[in-house]
Image (cartoon, rainbow, N blue to C red):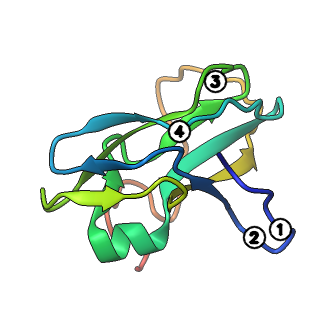
Amino acid sequence: MPTKGSIDSGAIDVYMPESGVICGQAKLIGLGFKAAVPFGHVALLLPRSSTGAKFGVELNNTCGIIDADYRGEWMAMMKTKTGIPYLWNAGDRLLQFLVVPVASVMLELVETLDTTGRDQGGFGSSGT
């Protein structure tokens, strides 16, 4: 279950509802709660930086998306990058989520696009 996020927090930690283990094979893990994301927003579910950097915990789909109209239990498809098992206890914080606004856009199919300074440069073409 998530905690109350502080006004200074960028994301809200998710406390694991029960003990478990993951390894190199993706495993669906129920997070033990349901929550309504405000309309006009989306929740981005991510590993906490400590579990990702220190233990190789990752989401199989890179980033979980919880839409505003979803009402089921929040879940995560998790694994480790190395295949080395990672064990946690009930109450450990492995994941976090951000609630961010989404733009309301109208898509239009066109034959050509306008050019920009970057144009078709691809990866690394923005100078970084």
Query: Residue 11 or 3: which is nearer the viewer?
Result: 3
Residue 56, by quadrant, is bottom left
Mark 4 / mark 3, whichever is N-terminal: 4
- The answer to whether the residue labelled 1 contacts the one labelled 2, judged by CB atoms less than 8 Å apart, is yes
- Residue tagged by mark 4? 31
10 Å neighbourhood of mark 3: few (<14), some, or many (≥20)?
few
- The answer to whether the residue labelled 1 contacts the one labelled 3, judged by CB atoms less than 8 Å apart, is no
| Disc 4 from disc 3: Cα separation | 34 Å
Q: Secondary structure at mark 4?
A: loop
Residue found at x 73% / y 39%: 102
| Disc 3 from disc 2: Cα separation | 33 Å
| Disc 1 from disc 2: Cα separation | 5 Å
- Residue tagged by mark 3? 107
Residue found at x 54% / y 20%: 109
Q: Secondary structure at mark 1?
A: loop
The N terminus, quarter of image: top right
Residue 7 placement (x, y as % from top left): 87, 69
10 Å neighbourhood of mark 2: few (<14), some, or many (≥20)?
few
Question: Viewed as shown, does residue 64 lie left or right of 72?
Answer: left
Tag 1: amino acid: Ser
Residue 97 placement (x, y as % from top left): 62, 52
Tag 4: amino acid: Leu
- Residue tagged by mark 1? 6
- Residue tagged by mark 2? 9
Residue 66, by quadrant, is top right
Residue 82 placement (x, y as % from top left): 14, 62
Q: Secondary structure at mark 2?
A: loop
Query: Residue 104 or 38: which is nearer the viewer?
Result: 38
Tag 3: amino acid: Leu
Query: Residue 118 or 83: which is nearer the viewer?
Result: 83
Residue found at x 47% / y 45%: 18
Q: Is residue 111 above or below residue 82?
A: above
